[in-house]
Image (cartoon, rainbow, N blue to C red):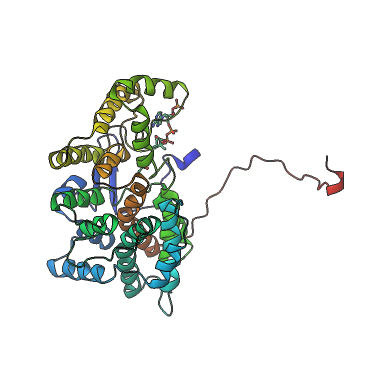
Amino acid sequence: MPGLAGVPATRSNISFVDGARGILEYRGIPVEQLATHSTFLETTYLLIWGYLPTKAQLYQFEEDILHQRRVKYPIRDMIKCFPDQGHPMDALQASVAALGLFYPLGEYQLTDEHYTREAVVNLVAKLPTLVAMFHQMRQGNDPVAPRDDLSHSANFLYMLTGQVPDPRVARIFEVCLILHAEHTVNASTFGALVTASTLADPYTVITSAIGALSGPLHGGANEEALAMFGQIGDATQARSFIQERLARKEKIMGLGHRVYRTKDPRALVLQQLVKELFKIYSPSPTYKIAQEVEQVCMELLAPKGIYPNVDFYSGIVYEKMGIPSDIFTPVFAISRVAGWLAHWREQLSNNRIFRPTQIYTGPRQVEYTPLQARG
Ligand code: ACO
């Protein structure tokens, strides 16, 4: 089955998607409820340990994360040597791989609770610092040190921009992190599962997942969608742009999904967030273009079950917050690390190495031709 479409790859009790009705639940809780009431770190706890933490458990988790936001100097020096023009997703992947060098398994087992907790805290706490650090250093600035009085989301925006965000903006960003935290066995999570199944360490697992997320058919689509709105330039040009693109058999970025046959529930929440942001800042002309693209695609693509996905509106939200477009996918990673780690733990609880089979379509028993005899 190409792309393993419809093939169950694992049993999981982390999240649930109903693609026909547009339902997404984390550990049974609808994502909309978490977006309204939860924080990213509470949602992370829920995803990884399977239940909502008590006040004391949440406090301890938040404290642990707070104390692990900083990264070691050799990592900072390494990031300084990265090329300024390199993509931040590549920088993040390299940084996380390097991070693993500093936290070896040692005498622990992969499943020891102490080791698991250290890895979870390290990765959740440090990914935002790594993303912001590369962004500052590629501009020739010193990294902005994390601030202990700021929440996870506010602190990231602060480290990225050097400005403490408006609390309303920080809350909207927090909701974005909650919405992106988990989504069943998508490509990057499957990448994480495959690597986890070899009993590689969690830093390597997350490195694999970051690589898979970076592609334009997956997490990279948010950057591409915003670039597409920019190319369209004006809402009046949307129809002809989409028609021409479809005539060339090209995809419209931010639309379509392997599972959803209706509008992605996360896109619905993101659209609301766009409107909330417009109350804080002035409305963005890009939104008009996006709405027109959606309208045209409803006519042309919805009959095939192709609707806006999570990446369609997220770029507009992030752009309005002043996040550069090549940081959109790294932002996805600092959220999705929660889901990847939850799946890593679940995989180890009942592990068998992933080793599918193939249908061989090549020649057999071919005689070796010596180099000098080849044309
Ligand atoms: N624009 C136009 N046509 C599309 C789109 C699209 N965005 N998505 C799917 N189609 C069409 C395909 O051309 C194909 O048509 P055909 O049967 O006439 O050949 C049909 O729908 C099925 O498409 P597939 O690519 O086979 O669907 P698949 O389930 O393999 O892919 C995917 C899903 C990768 C998300 C696809 O819809 C896509 O490429 N979308 C654009 C990229 C994107 O937004 N990715 C983000 C997804 S969400 C996430 O990963 C976080």
Give percent across and percent down for residue 291: 25, 28
The answer to which image quadrant residue 202 occupies is bottom left
> 180 above or below 234?
below
State whether residue 367 appears in this view. yes
Give percent across and percent down for residue 198: 49, 62
> 324 above or below 107?
above
Query: Which residue lies at the image location 44% right of the left edge and 45% below the top edge?
Result: 215
The answer to which image quadrant residue 270 occupies is top left
In-front residue for pair 139/260: 139
Q: Please give the count of numbered marks on the rendered protein.
A: 0
State whether residue 370 appears in this view. no
In-front residue for pair 54/158: 158
Give percent across and percent down for residue 326: 37, 46
- Residue farthest to the bottom? 107
Query: Which residue lies at the image location 45% right of the left edge and 28% below the top edge?
Result: 250
Query: Which residue lies at the image location 25% right of the left edge and 35% below the top edge?
Result: 21
Q: Is residue 231 left or right of residue 362?
A: left
- Residue farthest to the front? 140
Tell me which image quadrant ligand 1 sits in. Answer: top left
> 74 above or below 309?
below
- Residue farthest to the right? 373
Give percent across and percent down for residue 132: 33, 58
Q: Is residue 236 left or right of residue 374?
A: left
> 373 above or below 21?
below
In-front residue for pair 313/356: 313
The answer to which image quadrant residue 366 occupies is top right
Q: Is residue 164 left or right of residue 241?
A: left
Quarter of the rendering occupied by the C terminus:
top right
